[in-house]
Amino acid sequence: MHPTTPPLTLPEVEALAREAHAGQRDKAGRPYAEHLRAVAEGVRRRGGDADQIAAAWLHDAVEDDALSERWLREAALSRRTKDIVLALTRSPGETPQAYAARVLATPGAALVKEADLAHNADPDRLALLDAATRARLTAKYTRMRALLGLPETPRTGDERDAPGDGS
């Protein structure tokens, strides 16, 4: 970010994320922006700050090739938001253990990942999938929660004792 460029506001980040993921659907066929909104709201409810909420809107953008890593590096976003998005971007062939270690090592990233996993594992959302996909994803999300040291049952984010930076 150039020193004279004002940082993007949260509504601008939301609009960019919605545009970048336009036409994309989740595994249940729902507009992908619904997932982004749910993760951003989950971060907010868990006490996340503006950097984390911005990262929530963008958490899948680079991994899904909706936005390039170059775009992210040059965007008018805080260094912390960029670091969180990059921490949440899986590399091809990366092990779950390496991914979890990077998330845990990046200040603020664990809270965003917690909100992401909570929405991914939402029973109403999973109920829209076939049994085999539901079982596979449930196991995947449970394993990641364990690697991140999160409780087995996702918290809703309504708890008032939630840490602000997820670490």
Image (tube, helix red, strand yellow):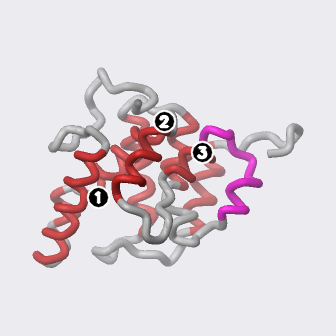
Q: Are marks 2 and 3 in contact (CB under 8 Å)?
A: yes
The disc placed on residue 120 is: 1
Q: Are marks 1 and 2 in contact (CB under 8 Å)?
A: no
Q: Which residues are magenta?
A: 69-81
The residue closer to the viewer here, 126 or 15, is 126
- Which tag is nearer the camera, tag 3 or tag 1? 3
Residue at 52%, 52% (x, y): give it: 57
The disc placed on residue 165 is: none
Q: Amino acid at mark 3?
A: Asp
Q: Is residue 38 visible?
A: no
Q: Secondary structure at mark 3?
A: helix
- The number of discs equals 3
Q: Are marks 3 and 1 in contact (CB under 8 Å)?
A: no
CA distance for labels 2 and 3: 9 Å
Q: Amino acid at mark 1?
A: Asn
In primary-sequence order, the first of circles 1 and 2 is 2
